[in-house]
Image (cartoon, rainbow, N blue to C red):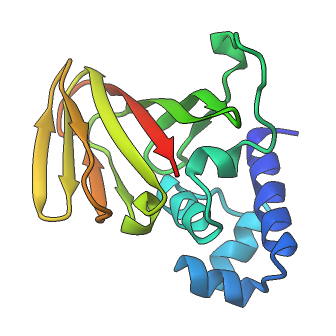
Amino acid sequence: MDIEAQLAQRIADLRARRGWTLAEFAERSGVSKSMLSKVERQEASPTATILLRLASALGLTLAELMAEQVASDRFLGKDAQPGWIDPTTGYHRRQVYLSPALPLELVEVHMPPGKRVAVPASSYALIRQVVWVLEGRLVIEEGDQTTVLGPGDRLEFGPPADVMYRNDGEVVARYLVAVVRG
């Protein structure tokens, strides 16, 4: 089963385990009932923003939503680390680290030039996060504060706020997101 099919099945299973109707899930997530239905039936590929809204409604991080099973090996080669590409922006995320033994997540992201991803404040309610830019330039709008990051720069996020990640540059912005759950 490919990543899109796995993700659709996982979303449907998580909703069903909670006993939520599509209407209840739509209300909790802010994603339309028709879009939820299309995602669960694999008729539409969810964007990063939609997945973040669904994860928040379920009380999960994006990594927890996307990973049904967590690798327990101490070593996990690059090719075995799960990846996902946003169908609209081409934003590519690779789950470098996720474990039930440690409340830390590491995600490598490649943001194409001229693209942006919006993240709702609810995504930050259960986590603390730091972004470290490895290559390129990344603009982060966190609430009413805008920060421009270049290679080597890092930003620790404050209290939950709506966030916009933007790559206004001409090359891919590659960055690492470190998340601490709980």
Residue at screen point 81% across, 38% down: 69
Instruction: Judge whether 155 appears above or below 18 on screen.
Output: above
Q: Position of residue 38 (x, y in %)?
A: 72, 70
Instruction: Judge whether 109 appears above or below 179 on screen.
Output: above
Residue at screen point 77% across, 17% down: 73
Q: Nearer the viewer, residue 180 or 121?
A: 180
Instruction: Judge whether 139 appears above or below 16 on screen.
Output: above
Q: Position of residue 135 (x, y in %)?
A: 27, 18
Q: Position of residue 70 (x, y in %)?
A: 76, 34
Q: Nearer the viewer, residue 149 or 32?
A: 149
Residue 94 visible in rendering: yes
Residue at screen point 52% across, 52% down: 182
Image quadrant containing the N terminus: top right
The image quarter in which residue 130 lies:
top left
Q: Nearer the viewer, residue 20 or 59?
A: 59
Residue 91 visible in rendering: no
Residue at screen point 53% across, 63% down: 50
Q: Position of residue 93 (x, y in %)?
A: 52, 34
The image quarter in which residue 85 lies:
top right
